[in-house]
Amino acid sequence: MKKKTWLSLLAIFCSLLFVVAACSNDTGSKGDNKDKAEAEGSGASGDKTLVFGRGTDSIQLDPSKVTDGESLNVTIQIYDTLVKYKQEDTEVQPSLATEWNVSDDGKKWTFKLRDDVKFHDGNDFTAEDVVYNFERWATSADFIYYGYMFGATEDNLKGIIDKVEATDKYEVTFTLSEPNAPFLYTLAMSPFGIASPKAIEKYGDDYFKNPVGTGPFVFEEWVPDDKITLKKNGDYFGDVAKLDQVVFKTIPDNGARFMELQAGTIDLMNGLNPQDIQTVEGDDNLQIIRRPSMNVAYMAMNTDKDGPMAEKKVRQAINMAVDKKQLITLFEGVGKAAKNPLPPSLWGYNDDVKDYDFDPDKAKALLAEAGYPDGFDVKLNIFSNPRDYMPQPKVTAQAIQEMLKKVNINVKIVESDWDTHLELTEHGKHDMAFLGWTGDNGDPDNFMYVLLDKDNAKMGSAGNIAFYKNDEVHDLFKKAQVEMDQDKRTDYYMKAQEIIHDDAPWLPIAHTTPPLAANKNVSNYQPHPTGSEALNLVDVE
C-alpha cells in the first residue's frame, strides 16, 4: 500500500477520535484555541492560533523555486514583494517600494524603497538586497518563475532584465531589454518575495527549509508531511498580525480534513468536497468562503512525444469524445466548463471560440484519418491530492477514461502524489496529464505565455507540459508582452486562442470557484483570486 494511502487511513482514524472527543466534552467550546494549541504541541494558552488544514505539504519555502500553491500559501506570509496586490483584486499598491516611475520607452523602472524595514534575522532591508535577489534568480534555471515571467532561457538567464542597480541606499532601478506590459504586476507575485541575503548565505542549499523574509509572519518549524508553524512578526512595518501564530496542517484526505473542521481541531480548510458544501451551509458553527475564479483545470497532451498525441487530429478527436456537460457535473456547482486556456474572468478572453461538440462518431472518423482506426492505448498521469481547480482528480479521470473507451482509446490511469506528478510532467514523462493553473497577476500573459509558449516547454522545468510549440502563437505572445496598449494586446490574445483551439494541445476541463470552509470564529478572511493571501488581517474569536 502506498505511503499516501496509509496517511489517508491514519488521518481518517485520528479524525474519528477527534469527533468522539469533541462530542463527549460538555464544557469545551468548539474550536477552542487552547485545545488546538495543545493538540498541535505549540503555542501558549491564550495565544490566537489559526490552524489551516490542507491536502498536501509545501514542496519548499524558497518561493522563487516553486509553482505549487501550497508552497506559495505559506511563503506569502513570510516574504514581502516590492509591490503587492490589493486585498480583493490584482490592482497594484505599495509594499517594500513606496513609489515608482517608468521611462517613456518603458525600459527603465525606478522604485523608491521603505527605509524602516528589517528582515526577520535583524538585518536592515536596503536596495542592495533587491539587487542580490534578482541577480540570484538570474543565475539558474532552478528559479522557475523568473524564467516563466521574464523570458529567461538557458542561453540568456537574465531574460528581459538587463540589469538591476542600487541607485541609492533606498532606490533600485531596473533596466529592461524591451518594454514589458505586465512588469509591474509581475513584481507583485509572491515568487518574487525578497529574502535575506545573509540567511541565504548562512543556510546555503538548506535555505529552502529555513526561510527569512520581512513579512508579517516568521518561520518557526516545519515537520514534513505534518505541519508548518509560523509566528507573528511583532515588528512588521505594515499591519501587524492579529494572530499570534498560524499552523498549516497537512491532512491528505478531504473527508478526514472536513471531519477535523467539524470537530474544531482546525479552523479553516481548502479542498472541500463539493458534496460537503451543503453540510457546511447547514451547520451554525461553520461558514463557506468562496475564492474568486481565476484558474483553469486541463488535461495536457504531450505533443512532443512520438505516437498518437503528436497528431492534431487525435487531439481534436479526444476533445470531441469527452462530454463536457457530463464531466462538469462532477464539480457539483463549483465549476464551469472550460473551452480556452484563459479564464473568462480575465480581459482578453475569446468567447467567440466555439468549444468542440461532443461527437463520438466524428471522433472515430478523425482517429481513422490520423491512422488509428482501431484506437490505441495511452496513459493518463493524475495527482492524488485535491487542487482548488480540480477537487476530485481520480473521479474526473475515471469519467474521461470511460468516455474515451467508447471511441476505442484505452486509458490507463497512473496516480501519483503531487511532488512526483510535477516531476513527471515537467520532464515530459507522460502521454496525457492533468494539471491546472491559478493566475498570479491578473494578466493573460501569466496563463498564455507560461502554459503554452514554446519558451516554457523546457524539459525539466516545463510550465508548458503539452510541450506545444507553435511559432505563430509565440510571435503573438511576444508582441503582446511589449505592447503597452491593452486593446492591441487583447487582439493578439484573441487570435492566439483561436490557433490553440484548433491545434488542441489540451482538453480544457473547468474554471472553478473554489470553496473553503471555516469555523464561524474566523473573521476578516478574504480569499484572493491569485490563490494565496497574507493572513495578517485575519482574526479568530
Image (cartoon, rainbow, N blue to C red):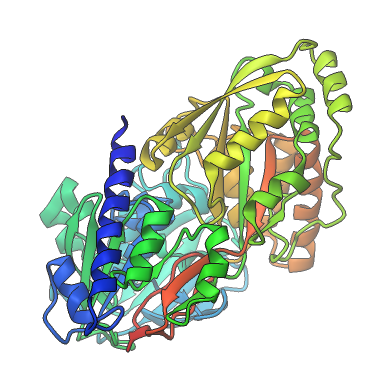
Does any portion of residue 45 appear in the rendered image? Answer: yes
Residue toward you, 259 or 536: 259
Q: Quadrant of the C terminus?
A: bottom left
Q: Residue at x 71, y 27 (%)?
A: 404
Q: Residue at x 80, y 11 (%)?
A: 373
Residue 3: horizontal and vertical position, in percent?
28, 36
Residue 414: horizontal and vertical position, in percent?
48, 28
- In this rendering, would 210 be left or right of 149? left
- In this rendering, would 148 be left or right of 258? right
Residue 72: horizontal and vertical position, in percent?
38, 60
Residue 398: horizontal and vertical position, in percent?
60, 34
Quarter of the image for residue 91 reads bottom right
Q: Quadrant of the N terminus?
A: top left
How many marks on residues? 0
Quarter of the image for residue 368 reads top right
Q: Residue at x 37, y 62 (%)?
A: 259
Figure check: 139 above or below 398: below
Residue toward you, 436 or 54: 54
Residue toward you, 266 or 182: 266
Figure check: 132 above or below 501: below
Does any portion of residue 453 appear in the rendered image? Answer: no
Figure check: 490 above or below 422: below
Q: Residue at x 51, y 54 (%)?
A: 149
